[in-house]
Image (cartoon, rainbow, N blue to C red):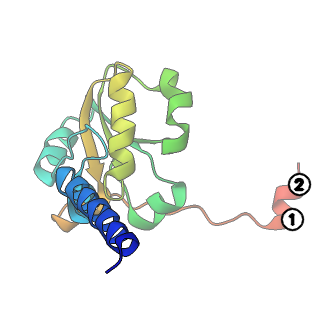
Amino acid sequence: MNKKVSSLLALILIATAQIAYAADEAPAKPAAEAAKAPASKAHVLNRAEIDALLAKPEQVLFIDVRRPDEITEKGTFPVFLNVQAKDLAKYLAFIPKDRTIVTVSNHAGRAGKSADLLADNGFKVAGAAGSEGYEAEGGKLVRITPPPPKPADAAAKP
């Protein structure tokens, strides 16, 4: 083997060793472990915790942060206010601070982030609820039937 080839092989081996050492030094988190990382600090409430809060409707407010079509399709909790997650910060002044708040979404993802926002702004937040998880645990949601659409000619009349 000539000197140039052996020098090149030595450089390749050194570079490979450095890459391998760096990989051992800071291993990447597996995707499953990264997925387990909480998206929010909010506690995700189970059915028993939600039912205990629902037993005191004068003290609790459920803020459903889903779109209206999701609420209609999947159902929601009584004593609720609907403010979509993307608009919540704009309406903080209109949310009562004298009630314990539970935020609601389908799987508690958006609800958790919304609960964090409320807690960071001085609201008393019990946690986040996933409507689908609550139902899976045997809980009953309120179904809302939207009113039928108005006929086009009735909408035009004064």
> Given contact means CB atoms under 8 Å apart, are the residues at marks 1 and 2 in contact?
yes
Which residue sits furthest bottom?
Answer: 1
Q: Nearer the viewer, residue 98 or 154?
A: 98
Name the disc covering residue 36, or none: none
Q: Which residue is mark 2?
A: 157
Q: Secondary structure at mark 2?
A: loop
Q: Quadrant of residue 142?
A: bottom left
Name the disc covering residue 153, or none: 1
Q: Nearer the viewer, residue 43 or 92?
A: 43
Residue at point 53%, 42% (across, down): 86
Residue 16: x %, y % from top left: 28, 65
Q: Quadrant of residue 153?
A: bottom right
Residue at point 34%, 66% (across, down): 7
Residue 123: x %, y % from top left: 33, 23
CA distance for labels 1 and 2: 7 Å
- At label 2, the amino acid type is Lys
Q: Secondary structure at mark 1?
A: helix
